[in-house]
Amino acid sequence: MLCVVIEPNVEIKKGKDLSVRAVKQINVIWQKAFPGNEPVEPRNKKLFSKDTFFIIRDSKGMILSVGRLKPVKLTFLKKVYYVQGIADIVSVLKRRGYGKVLMHSMHEYLNKTKRTGVGFCIRKNSPFYHKGGFRIAKNLVRRFLYKNSKGQIIKGKGTDDVDVIYLSGKDKFIEKVLANSKEKVLIPIPHW
């Protein structure tokens, strides 16, 4: 069982190693924050088994903040890149610093592993991620296009106020995307 601790009170675990109790707690938090998303439940654990979860708990074991890095395979200029999708960041108690600690831990983890992290956020939340050391690219989201299982390319809807947050890794994926401003990035799932 992999359990890495970067900062005090921050657990880093693979989805397959989460306890049933943790999965249920995370599901309650995420269903409240992201109504309509597929539930995270013990019975569908395979869907998130390879994700890396970052969890901050209080002394009683209750989750205060949670987020994850989701392995995502992207295609750019006919080359495949494997990045970490920054996803589902939630602090149960706002303005207490738990989100900041969580993002600092993700940033440190990505740096240590030399992996590229890419996520999407509403523009009004971009300063939070920027303070956490992540870079922000406005209007880049329009170039991330979902390619469904039938091979159809679907443009994202409602992306006018969405920014891309990122941290560069050794693959230099983001630098290549920014240097080729007319090229699209194909993603296998809608914006995570």
Image (cartoon, rainbow, N blue to C red):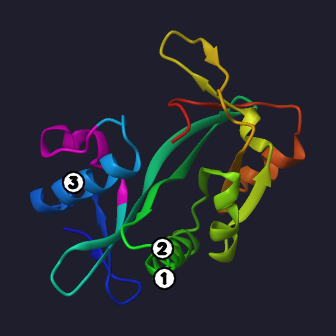
| Contact? badges 1 and 2 (CB < 8 Å) | yes
Which residue is label 1 attached to? 97
Q: How far across and how far down the image is residue 167, in percent?
A: 66, 63
Tell me the SS state at disc 1.
loop
Q: Nearer the viewer, residue 161 or 82?
A: 161
- Give the residue displayed 24% in from the left and 53% down from the top: 28
Give how far apart the Cα atoms at labels 2 and 3 are: 23 Å
Tell me if residue 6 is in the magenta stretch: no
Badge 2 amino acid: Gly
Image coordinates of residue 38 in percent, x first then y, are 31, 35
Q: Which residue is mark 3?
A: 16
Percent x, y of residue 173:
71, 50
Q: Earlier in the sequence, mark 3 or mark 1?
A: 3
Q: Which residue type does callout 3 highlight?
A: Lys
Q: Amino acid at mark 1?
A: Gly
- Which residue lies under the disc numbered 2? 99
* Location of residue 58 (image quadrant): bottom left
Tell me where the magenta segment starts and ends, as one range: 39-52
